[in-house]
Image: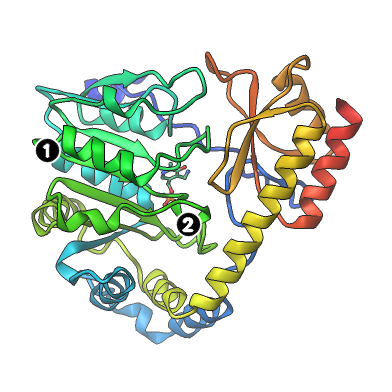
Amino acid sequence: MSKFWSPLTASLVPYVPGEQPKDKTYIKLNTNENPYPPSPKAIEAIRNAAGADLRLYPDPTCDELIRKAAAYYGLRPEQVFAGNGSDEILAFAFAAFFDPANKVQFPDITYSFYKVYAKLYGLQAELIPLDERFRIPIDRFRGTGGVVIPNPNAPTAELVPLAQIRELLENNKEQAVIIDEAYIDFGGESAVPLISEYPNLLVVQTLSKSRSLAGLRVGFAFGSEELIDGLNRIKNSFNSYTLDRLALAGAVASFEDEAYFKETTAKVIATRERVSEQVAALGFKLTESKANFVFISHPSIAAERIFRELRGKGVLVRYFNQPRIDGYLRVSIGTDEEMDAFIRALREIV
Ligand code: PMP
């Protein structure tokens, strides 16, 4: 607390990001990064952009990148917004579409930034509990103040099938519905094609996970022109240069290397399936993952103990000291070698 803080600052409960240790010797399976490097084409484009032109401001409307992202999904550029990571876009969307007079709904176990943004913008939140198998009960989302659903959900990794997303949209036509597809490329089906039917649907995606560019901070939103206009009003009231020149160059090049994206995504999925079988064979319960992480629980050994012992063996995973999921660990999918080391460490513990 400080006497210089505004009442807003004093009221905030900031997000605590996963650990990013300086010590590179850890096998880092705690923040859902991609274990493979970004496309060599993206790295080369960033190198080429690191020159004299950095004295110039970047393109405030991100035209080239937005054209690429639009073409990828067969959308018009007016239906696409680019931002500094999907976290920034989600912040803009909470500000742009949700009214403090109504309650915004999201699952009770979900990406914890949603709560932080709700607080930041003075919104009331209604948290809808997951069912006993950690699935999102779609028919309970009938709010008046907007809906936010990550698909797949984090940290539970469960996917909501597209037919249920359509049901959600049918039940909520009068307020914005945000589908956060940070992990959609690891086995889900995107809701982007529904944009043409539902002007209140905003789909948020990121290059941080399936495109291995978490360090570059690039995200997108796809939606009707009126929603994208709303995001641009918010963006231009903060800082119209949200994406820098290096990010724009790297992101454009990443879209030009589809083969690399497909290959690395397929590898992560194959490793996830193998690791899921191995942890199940060690006695763990798992949710059905369509993300680049698994959510696992041991019937008799406390998750916190496994977390600490893994850490002692140089393997970092994520433990949530939170009701209902404090028996679980979220383990990001690394390379095959990293996951072999994880399984070896786990065998010494259980
Ligand atoms: N949504 C979800 C569900 C996430 O797990 C994350 C990553 N922590 C994000 C959004 C934000 O990703 P980024 O800002 O890197 O695009």
**Badge 2 amino acid:** Asp
The residue nearer to you, when weighing 211 against 313, is 211
Callout 1: SS? loop
Taking the image as drawn, is residue 6 in sight?
Answer: no
Residue most extreme to the right: 348
The residue nearer to you, when weighing 226 against 9, is 226
Callout 2: SS? helix
**Residue 329 on image: x %, y %:** 65, 29
10 Å neighbourhood of mark 2: few (<14), some, or many (≥20)?
A: many
Q: Quadrant of residue 141?
A: top left
Left or right: residue 153 versus residue 243 is right
Compared with 344, 135 (above or below) is: above
Is the residue under label 2 in contact with that under label 1 (CB below 8 Å)?
A: no
- Residue drawn at the location 74% of the way across and 27% of the way down: 284
Taking the image as drawn, is residue 72 in sight?
Answer: yes
Residue of label 2: 185
The quarter in which the C terminus is drawn is top right
**Residue 80 on image: x %, y %:** 22, 63
- Residue drawn at the location 61% of the way across and 66% of the way down: 264
Left or right: residue 279 versus residue 172 is right
Gap between marks 1 and 2 measured at Cα: 26 Å
**Residue 175 on image: x %, y %:** 12, 36
Residue most extreme to the front: 163
Left or right: residue 3 versus residue 16 is left
The residue nearer to you, when weighing 43 against 264, is 264
10 Å neighbourhood of mark 1: few (<14), some, or many (≥20)?
A: some
Compared with 37, 274 (above or below) is: above
- Mark number, residue 173: 1
Dot 1 beta carbon under 8 Å from ligand 1:
no
**Residue 13 on image: x %, y %:** 38, 23
- Residue drawn at the location 44% of the way across and 80% of the way down: 256
- Residue drawn at the location 13% of the way across and 52% of the way down: 227
